[in-house]
Structures are given as C-alpha cells and as structure tokens.
Amino acid sequence: MTGRLKSTLAGMAMWLSLTLGWAGSALAVELTMYYPVAVGGPLTKIVDGLVADFMKENPDIKVKAIYAGNYNDTRIKALAALKAGKPAQLSVMFSIDIYELIEQDAIVAFDDIVETDEEKAWLQSFYPALMENGRTGGKTWGIPFQRSTIVMYYNKDAFKEAGLDPNKPPANWDELVSMGKKLVKKKDGQVDRWGLMIPSTGYPYWMFGALTKQNGQVLMNGDGNQAFFDAAPTVEALQFWQDLGSKHGIMPSGTIEWGTLRKTFLEGKTAMMWHSTGNLTAVKKNAKFDFGVAMLPAKKRRGTPTGGGNFYIFKQTTPEERRAAMKLIRFLTQPDRTAEWSIKTGYIGTRPDAYETQALQDYLKSFPPAAVARDQLEYATAELSTYQTGRVRKLLDDAIQATLTGTKPAKDALGAAQAQADRLLKRYQ
C-alpha cells in the first residue's frame, strides 16, 4: 500500500469518525428535569451525582436538572415553561399535584408509556402506601422518589435529664402530654426548652393529616372530590393540637415555623419535634446530643400521611423523549440507587427490594432510626390531595392556623373550610 493511499484512507477514517461522532451527538436526546430542593436535606449535590452517573451509562441522553426551590415553586415553574412553549420533559413535583396536573392535561400516564412486561412489573414494585398519591382512575401518573412520612425526633439526653427512659418515647397522645410536661424546662420563669414542637407553617395540612389519621379519620376520599374537614374526629384532632400549647403548655401557643424547626431542635430548644424523615441525615450529621427517631404516637391508632415528591412525565414530549425519561426514572429507582438515595438523604427507600440490598441492610444495622419511616408505612395514608388541591389545601391551612392562634374555635374554622371545599369540589362529584 502506497503512502498516499494510506494517507487517503486515514483521512477518510478520520472524516467518518468525526461525522459519526457529530451525528451521534446531534441525535442525543436532551431532557430537562425540574427538581425541588428546598424541602430538607443536602439534595443538589446528590441529584447531580446521580444524573452524572446516568449520563455516563447513557451517553446518548443528556440531562439538565433545574433546581426550583420548594414543591410549589417547582410546579409553578414547570407549568409556566409548559405554557411558554419551552416545556421540560419530566419533573419531581408534589405527589399531591396529581389532580391539578391531570386536569391541566399536563402529564401522561406511565401505563401509556411502558412497553415490556419488565416495565409493567416495575410499576408494581413500589410500596402500595406510596402509590396512593400516584394512582387515580385506574392509571399510574406518578412514580414515588423523594418520599417521606412524618416521624418524631426526640432528644435522648433531655429524656434522661427529665427522668424519662430514653428508649421509650411516647406511644400515645396521653404519654405525649405527660412526657411533654416533664420535658419542659424553665429558667428564670421563661421556657428554656419546650417538650414538643409540631410545625404549623409551610405544610400545616400535612401535620394535621397525621393527627386526624391517629384519631381514625382521613381528610378526603380516594377520588379527590370530597373532603372531610368537619367530621367529628377531624375537629377533635385540631382541638388536641391547639390544646398542646394553650392547655397543656408543652409547646408554644400559636404557630411554629417549618423552616426553622430543625435548627430549633438541634439547638436543644425543644425535646421532641414532628418533622419529615427527609431531615434524618441532616439531624444525624449535626446533632450534638444523642437522639432517637420514633413513629408518631397513637390515639385510636398510629397514623401518618405519606409525603414528598413523585416523578411525572409531561405530555408535550416526543416518543423518544418519553423513552429517555423512562430510562432515567427507572435508573434512579433501581434498588441499589434507591438504597443510595435513602442513605444519603434520609428519605424512604420507595421499594421493598431496596431494603434487601447489602448497603441498606448494613446502614440499618449501624443506624436503626433509618428504618422507622419505612416501618411506619404500615400505618400510613395518602397525603391530602383533591381536585382544586391548592385552593382546598389553603382552606384547611387557614382553618388550622386560625384555631392555633385562637382566632376561631376548631369547629367553626373547620366548618367554614368544609363549606367552601364543598363548593369547589361539587362539579367533580
């Protein structure tokens, strides 16, 4: 072979390589994913790492994660982009956004995307309690990812100081009150440490869903078109919440801030707090005292709503984008990835087989509190979600805060919220 021929062939090979490389990158599917991060835990770096791992394994798919504050911010930005003609392909949004997203024809059901028997089986691989907020009308619209329950964090050192067994947190409402009173610590007539704090800003309806479930009552039906705000057990639950501050004196009267409560607990200003399990890793990292994590106490039964975000795929997507989005979501919800996510964030491993991985089994042995949220799924119910969910939720939030601040009695506040919710939901019945 002559030198000229060799040179020509080499040049053709280089041209072909460059051409194919260009074509490959040009044909790469690009995904934009909106993601909420202002909800607890060091999420941005973790999500970036998982996305980078995915792109290494799938060089033909490019993923851009856009971080958008809290869940409401994420929904607003994603829907605004959709209306502006610059839609994302997928997003993690509130699991309770399902009815609004369906009503706006913004998302596609996963049942309409899955193709293989393996993919259909994947839809059935998650904890049923976590799927309650993702399914309606016989279809699956959301896949659980950043999911949580409410758990009780408690300061074991404070328990010892108060003469309480640090390994026996309150198991029912009566014990919550009696232990809470012992845990209150005063200095010069002022409260230096409260017994308990339950946040009542940010997501008051979520905390309230735990109290009502413990009292044997759910807040809505399974079709999202009826609320039970004025049911007697609902009223009793709100009265008990108010009484914790105004009557029993184990927590401050009025409202308690969601966003600063973790800091308050870490500073030793409350011996117990109810909060998302999504804070578990942050508390573990920053607590200067021995702490425990427990299921929420019972009245008629134990109970908590599930919470957090689901993956959704938007309807304004090409078949190629949908397949790529499915590939990303399936990658992020593999048992090993789910275990990694749970360990790093404190959120629940969303599928039972994640807890069969060696990594998560080892982690639970070294840090048993990580199992509490999972075990509590046995007593969990769906988070408040209805049609007109933003407006209905605000009615309940306003009623809760009116009662906690002493503006309205529980029965009156919830009765008014029920009447307005009935008007909003009537056309969906």
Image: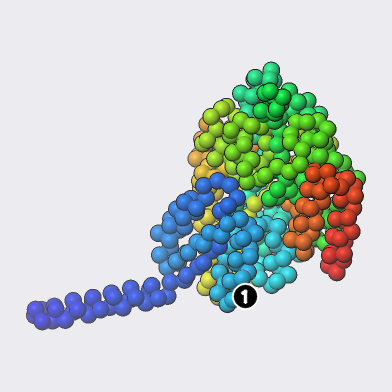
Which residue is nearer to you in this view: 106 or 67? 67
Direction from residue 186 to residue 248 in the image, left or right: right
Q: Residue visible at 64% across and 24% down? A: 158
Which is nearer the eye, 53 or 213?
213
Could you say whether the residue bearing mark 1 is in a helix, strand or loop? helix
Q: Is residue 292 above or below residue 280?
A: above
Instruction: Report the coloring of the rendering.
Output: rainbow
Quarter of image, res 88: bottom right
Front residue of this view, candidates 56 and 316:
316
Residue 152 pos. (x, y %): 68, 36
| Quadrant housing the C terminus | bottom right
Report whether 234 appears left or right of 361: right
Residue positioned most to the top: 163
Residue at coordinates 53% horizontally, 52% vertically from top-left? Answer: 334
* Image label count: 1
On the image, which quarter does residue 101 sit in?
bottom right
Give the residue number, with chain letter if any, for mark 1.
83
Residue 215 seen from this side: no
Q: Residue furthest front?
A: 188
Write down the quadrant of residue 355 in the picture. top right
